[in-house]
Image: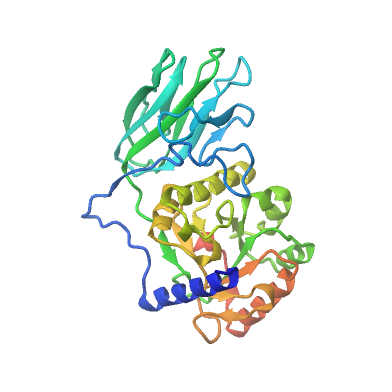
């Protein structure tokens, strides 16, 4: 299916959901949250993502010269292998996982090498890591557990070796416990205030004309750049999101149709983009724009596991000269306008602003209204 057809189908699906009043259901207060495996890329089977940083391990942050994958796995076809780059490095790899407050979690991994450590920080309680002085040539399972604090919503899982002890390997990391409630899916912002929300995707063609318009009009915009595009010109994305209410949010790593991917691949796409954003801009996203506006139930859970609260599509598309309002008629309060960082963005923004003015609406920032 072509990109245009996928987008049209996605918009039709979003419109149908909106007519029916459907969003992703939150877990009921009287219903026990599901216990699910929560770690991202736990078996290190996803070695790279398209458009990703070559040598990176999706879902994990490691020293770029220290970590890789090997075919000598405990199970499957791949495992993590880490060679500390110097005598003062432990070769730590870590990831952030969303959890529920006041819930119990079990953490385990299979490791091989000398002085290998497995643990979690930010749990709300001090927890000693599991570790082994050495496994010889065999794999050994490390296990630990923790209960999250009353205000804990994310924890940091880590694996590392020890100073001067050489390489280690790890595989089959498992974190089990109460899963976060799925993210909510919506195509607009529920509000009766006369507001419209400008969102800009991808980032491959950042233009000074669009940046100047945003600055001159003091427009709060929400940017959804792909990590590689953002890394090309990070200063530009800081500039266009400098107006109060603006933010940079998550759009996946490689812009694939997530409905064609497994739940594990979706989580790797969303969490890896989150991690890139944190490294580049210092903030963690809470809103996810699915590529081609397509998503499924796996997307909602994967997004929640990455700390995302909303999976957001759009009610109108003003990209590339378009003026499509999916619900028909003029723009309405709470509408989300889709745009793209292209060479037509300045003109597209002006056309969207004219439509908003005609409807008596003013632009506002998503982060102030989707909480």
Which quarter of the image is occupied by the C terminus? bottom left
Q: Residue furthest left?
A: 30
The answer to whether residue 129 is left or right of residue 29 is: right
Q: Name the residue at 24% across, 55% down.
A: 29
Residue 144: image x %, image y %?
33, 27
Q: Name the residue at 40% across, 18% down.
A: 138
Total numbered circles:
0
Which quarter of the image is occupied by the N terminus? bottom right
The answer to whether residue 57 is left or right of residue 237 is: left
Residue 34: image x %, image y %?
28, 48
Comparing 199 with 56, the one in front is 56
The answer to which image quadrant residue 14 occupies is bottom left
Seen in the picture, residue 173 relative to 193 is either above or below; the reply is above
Indicate how the structure is coloured in the image. Answer: rainbow
Comparing 15 with 208, the one in front is 15
Q: Is residue 323 visible?
A: yes
Q: Name the residue at 64% across, 76% down.
A: 352
The answer to whether residue 17 is left or right of residue 284 is: left
Residue 237: image x %, image y %?
68, 54
Q: Residue furthest bottom?
A: 329
Comparing 350 with 92, the one in front is 92
Q: Is residue 192 visible?
A: no
Seen in the picture, residue 180 relative to 150 is either above or below; the reply is below
Q: Name the residue at 59% across, 56% down.
A: 247
Residue 197: image x %, image y %?
56, 69
Seen in the picture, residue 75 relative to 139 is either above or below; the reply is below
Q: Residue furthest right?
A: 208
């Amino acid at each position: 299916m072509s990109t245009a057809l996928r987008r049209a189908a996605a918009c039709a699906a979003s419109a149908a959901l909106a007519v029916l009043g459907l969003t992703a259901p939150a877990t009921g207060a009287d219903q026990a949250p599901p216990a699910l495996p929560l770690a991202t890329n736990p078996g290190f089977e996803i070695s790279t993502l398209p458009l990703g940083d070559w040598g990176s391990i999706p879902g994990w942050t490691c020293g770029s010269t220290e970590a890789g994958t090997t075919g000598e796995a405990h199970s499957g076809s791949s495992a993590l292998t880490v060679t500390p780059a110097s005598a003062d490095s432990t070769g730590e790899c870590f990831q952030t996982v969303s959890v529920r407050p006041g819930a119990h979690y079990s953490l385990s991994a299979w490791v091989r090498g000398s002085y290998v450590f497995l643990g979690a920080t930010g749990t709300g309680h001090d927890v000693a890591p599991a570790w082994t002085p050495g496994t010889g040539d065999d794999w050994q399972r490390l296990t630990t557990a923790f209960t999250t604090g009353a205000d804990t919503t994310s924890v940091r899982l880590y694996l590392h070796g020890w100073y001067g002890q050489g390489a280690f390997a790890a595989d089959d990391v498992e974190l089990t416990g109460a899963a976060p409630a799925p993210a909510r899916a919506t195509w607009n912002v529920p509000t009766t205030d006369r507001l419209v929300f400008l969102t800009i995707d991808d980032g491959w063609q950042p233009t000074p004309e669009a940046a100047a318009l945003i600055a001159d009009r003091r427009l709060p915009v929400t940017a959804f750049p792909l990590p590689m595009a953002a890394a090309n010109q990070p200063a530009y994305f800081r500039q266009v999101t400098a107006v109060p209410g603006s933010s940079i949010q998550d759009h996946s790593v490689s812009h694939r149709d997530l409905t064609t991917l497994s739940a594990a691949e979706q989580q790797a796409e969303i969490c890896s983009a989150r991690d890139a954003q944190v490294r580049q801009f210092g903030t963690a996203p809470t809103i996810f724009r699915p590529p081609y506006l397509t998503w499924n139930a796996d997307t909602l859970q994967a997004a929640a596991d990455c700390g995302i609260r909303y999976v957001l599509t759009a009610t109108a598309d003003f990209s590339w000269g378009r003026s499509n309002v999916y619900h028909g008629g003029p723009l309405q309060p709470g509408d989300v306008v889709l745009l793209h960082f292209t060479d037509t963005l300045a003109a597209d923004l002006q056309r969207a602003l004219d439509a908003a003015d005609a409807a008596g609406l003013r632009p506002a920032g998503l982060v102030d209204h989707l909480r």
